[in-house]
Image (cartoon, rainbow, N blue to C red):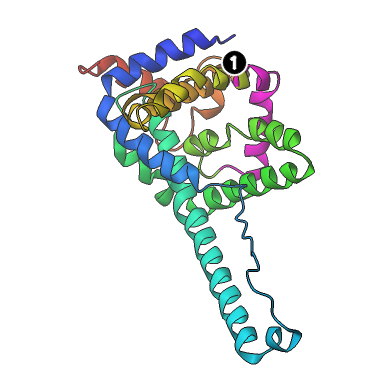
Amino acid sequence: MWTRAELKDNAKKFFKFNYWKMVLVSLVLGFAGGSGGGSGASVSFRKTYTYSLDEISSPELMGFLVAFFSAFTVIMVIGLAVAVFLLYPLHVGAQRFFVVSHYQKAEPGELGYAFSNGYLNVVKTMFLRGLYTFLWSLLLIIPGIIKGYEYRMIPYILAENPGIDTREAFEISKKMMDGNKWNAFVLDLSFLGWSILSAFTCGILSIFYVNPYIHMTNAELYVALKEITFGGRGQYYQNTQQYQAGQMDQNFQNDQNY
């Protein structure tokens, strides 16, 4: 069974040996993850002046409203397209970087992994992950949070298996998080102090330490759950394209920089 202390100790060790690259990838991950999924935009209109019915229905006003909502719709569609087709694959590539860092010194080139490996499947699966989380959140906040933790491992699963069937990715994530949601929630809470401290540095501490530390710890959680769920070093994944856990362990041992 994994412990918070063990995950964090491992994360600090790997962070130390690949510091600047992890800082860079964390910046990209923060950008990609921030656009991600269930949050929607809301616009409020405040009426400052009182118009007569004739004024409200005038062609000029109606034309303005049509143009405004058309522009708003176009912006929303473009934003969604950028999130789905650019940021989701970047998100998966960044998570792959941190998982690879468990086995060897990873390179920022991992960021582009999903663009050349199972791209459309990654896009579809990540989109459905965000959509399902959003829809569950509509029921109340708590179901959305629970489902968010249930789907937590999907980006990591895609990072190792970009061509995996979408339904299977959801099932594997659910299996891995079964009995671990609360502990993962507590793990997240354990970084609260760091987040508060980062606020006093205007986010500088987050960029150069806290965010890479958190991302690497989450990758360590994935590796631990994979080994617990599938046994050994995650036998389920050892035949994945260009990513065999056993080979990475060997590379890690041979890396003179570690």
Q: Quadrant of residue 144?
A: top right
Identified at 69% across, 76% down, the residue is 50
> Position of 248 compared to 136: left or right?
left
Please tell me which residue is depicted at 46% across the width and 23% down the height of the picture: 196
Depth check: 207 or 219 in front? 207
Residue 173, picture quadrant: top right
Residue 211, can we see it? yes
Residue where numbered disc 1 is placed: 228
In the depicted view, which residue is nearer to us: 56 or 231?
56
**Magenta-span inclusion, residue 191:** no
Inspect the image, locate mark 1, and give the three-letter code of the amino acid beneath it: Ile
On the rendered structure, is 30 left or right of 208? right
Residue 157 at what x, y percent from top left? 54, 34
The range drawn in magenta is 164-184
Q: Nearer the viewer, residue 95 or 139?
A: 139
Q: Check if residue 177 falls in the magenta segment.
A: yes
At horizontal 28% and vertical 24% (from top left) the residue drawn is 18
Is 238 above or below relative to 4?
A: below
| Image-based side of 73 in relation to 248, left or right | right
Q: Secondary structure at mark 1?
A: helix
Q: How many marks?
A: 1
Q: Residue at x 32, y 23 (%)?
A: 104
Residue 218 on image: x %, y %: 49, 24
Query: Can see residue 191?
Result: no
Quadrant location of the C terminus in the rendered image = top left
Q: Is residue 100 left or right of residue 75?
A: left
Residue 257 point in image, percent of width and height: 21, 18
| Whole-percent x, y for residue 216 in the image | 42, 24
Q: Quadrant of the N terminus?
A: top right
